Image: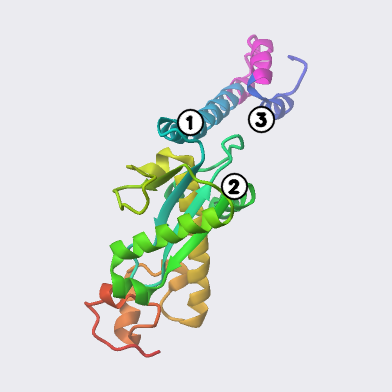
Amino acid sequence: MIDLTVPEIRRKLQTASAEEFAVLERSLVADTRKGVRQAVEVARRRLEAEAAEAARLAGMYAFERELAAERGGSVVLGLDEVGRGPLAGPLAVGGVVLDHADVIAGLNDSKQVAPDDRAAVAAAVRERARAWTVQYVEPADIDRMGMTAALREAFGRAIAAVEEAGVAVDVVLLDGNPLHVDEREVNVVKGDAKCASIAAASLVAKVARDALMEEYDAQYPGYGFASNKGYGSEGHMEAIRQKGLTPLHRRSFCTAFTQESLF
């Protein structure tokens, strides 16, 4: 390939598969041009990163398949919550049953997915999952029942919604500590990083709740809901001190602020 220019070789390497790279690398072993050596190294690092990502994804799917097989089943419902800690807005719980033969690229704990990529990965989950749902518990209900009961309520509704969609679930995977929501419940510490379906549930819930808080920002301007998503940023807390609480606020979470609601 010595007759090719460095830019031409670089373009070939940029899109080469692992098999194609092996052939190209052998053909370029005697090419000492600096640009060629750099292009080969860049391609090698790209392919190593792609292989590592493929292995990570395969591991997430395999991990939950093995959990299900240990319990004599194969259909896994992953559940995860978003919005446990904000001062305002609902608690959201996502539930997803994935097709284990259809690996979704980029799937990960929502906190590990770049904000610009979350919507696309969540859309792929919604399009390709066997079933999915997002269930909400509103702020007034969180105040009334407390967070633990709110979690149980939302998780239970998510399980029911998936089964009402016609998917018979063998195993229910939850991230973190036991909630005793369902007899099929299996709890996985850091499950959103280990189990594909829990990661998918985290993503669909995160994207749905963020979009909802952006809508609420227009209804209740000045609190920064579009950016803080209801969490206790300094600007949000100052807005509460100046403007009071809205119907979106969890009053039991806002005991440090004594002003009455202006809404």
Residue under circle 1? Answer: 62
Mark 1 belongs to which amino acid? Ala
Residue under circle 3? Answer: 14
Distance (Cα) linking label 3 and label 2: 32 Å
Give the magenta-colored segment's residue range: 19-39
Label 3 or label 2, whichever comes before in sequence order: 3
Residue under circle 2? Answer: 129
Labels 1 & 3 near each other (Cβ < 8 A): no
Nearer to the camera, 20 or 146: 146
Q: Kindly identify which numbered label has been placed on residue 16.
A: none
Distance (Cα) linking label 1 and label 3: 30 Å
Residue 236 seen in render: yes
Nearer to the camera, 259 or 132: 132
What kind of element bears circle 1? helix
Q: Residue furthest left?
A: 256
Question: Does 140 appear above or below 75?
Answer: below
The residue positioned 41% from the left and 34% from the top of the image is 71
Mark 2 belongs to which amino acid? Ala
Question: Does 191 appear above or below 237?
Answer: above
What kind of element bears circle 3? helix
Q: Is 199 placed left or right of 178 in the picture?
A: right
